[in-house]
Amino acid sequence: MSEEASDLDEVARKLFSGPIAFLKSAPSLNFLPAPAAPEVAFAGRSNVGKSSLLNKLTNRRDLARTSNTPGRTQELNFFDIGEPLRMRLVDMPGYGFAKAPKDVAKKWRFLVNDYLRGRQALKRALVLVDSRHGIKDIDREIMKMLDDAAVSYHLVLTKADKIKATELDEVTAQTAAEARKRPAAHPEIIATSSETGLGIDQLRRAVIEAVV
Ligand code: GTP
Ligand code: MG
């Protein structure tokens, strides 16, 4: 491992084993916290594993609430991460939740889009994609919105424990090919599992790189 990567791992180890606390929940933009620290946000389809990955990243079991049922996270949830760096992680409602009442789904979409497009403190979005399905049109919509708003994002494959290694290689290559065509996408694809911990160190480095 390069010296830089091991330095980042050291910062990551300290950061994610130090103080981490729920800050606040914002049901609409009026309730956003003052932008006092750089933010990294978890975006992706409903049930893709955003809240689970946030928990795994921070080594906490129930920091963000997760569920089998899509539509669990309904607000923007801000988490304060303490030392040695000050930053925030933001868990968001998923998009594309077919069973949500139309006006509710619309409200979430506006909330997520307005936050992602307009937040100065947002340093990077993590766009989570289920490794069993790959990028869907609804993900492309979010990616286009981020490209248009020049908000940098990192594509993260989730639930990698659910597919074979050869399938994971394939979906990673396909996702990387799409990322290369996207102006605001990071070229690296991070394959993760909140079950096994696959890719978590790599994801921590990406988060820290985004805020330093
Ligand atoms: P919403 O808040 O509804 O948008 O969902 P979310 O994207 O936050 O998903 P959540 O973390 O609540 O996870 C949804 C379901 O997928 C839960 O039953 C999790 O246990 C499961 N899950 C999440 N990540 C993984 C993973 O890496 N592997 C496996 N096998 N299951 C996972
Ligand atoms: Mg959630």
Image (tube, rainbow, N blue to C red):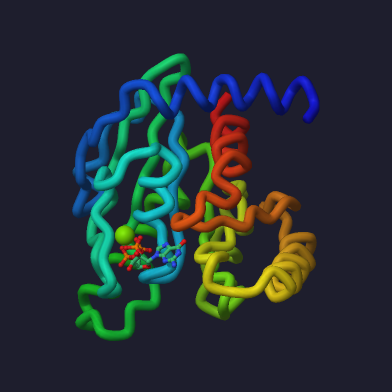
Q: Quadrant of residue 110?
A: bottom left
Which quadrant: the N terminus? Answer: top right
Give percent across and percent down for residue 96: 39, 77
Q: Is residue 182 above or below residue 98?
A: above
Quick check: can you spot residue 35? yes
Q: Residue at x 35, y 50 (%)?
A: 91
Q: Nearer the viewer, residue 209 or 164?
A: 164
Q: Is residue 193 above or below residue 20?
A: below
Give percent across and percent down for residue 63: 26, 43
Ligand 2's image quarter is bottom left
Give percent across and percent down for residue 184: 67, 52
Q: Residue at x 32, y 22 (%)?
A: 19
Which quadrant: the C terminus? Answer: top right
Q: Residue furthest top?
A: 84
Give percent across and percent down for residue 171: 69, 72
Q: Nearer the viewer, residue 195 or 181?
A: 195
Q: Is residue 97 above or below residue 37?
A: below
Q: Quadrant of residue 200?
A: top right
Q: Nearer the viewer, residue 54 or 44?
A: 54
> Horizontally, is 210 left or right of 120 in the view?
right
Q: Is residue 24 above or below residue 155?
A: above
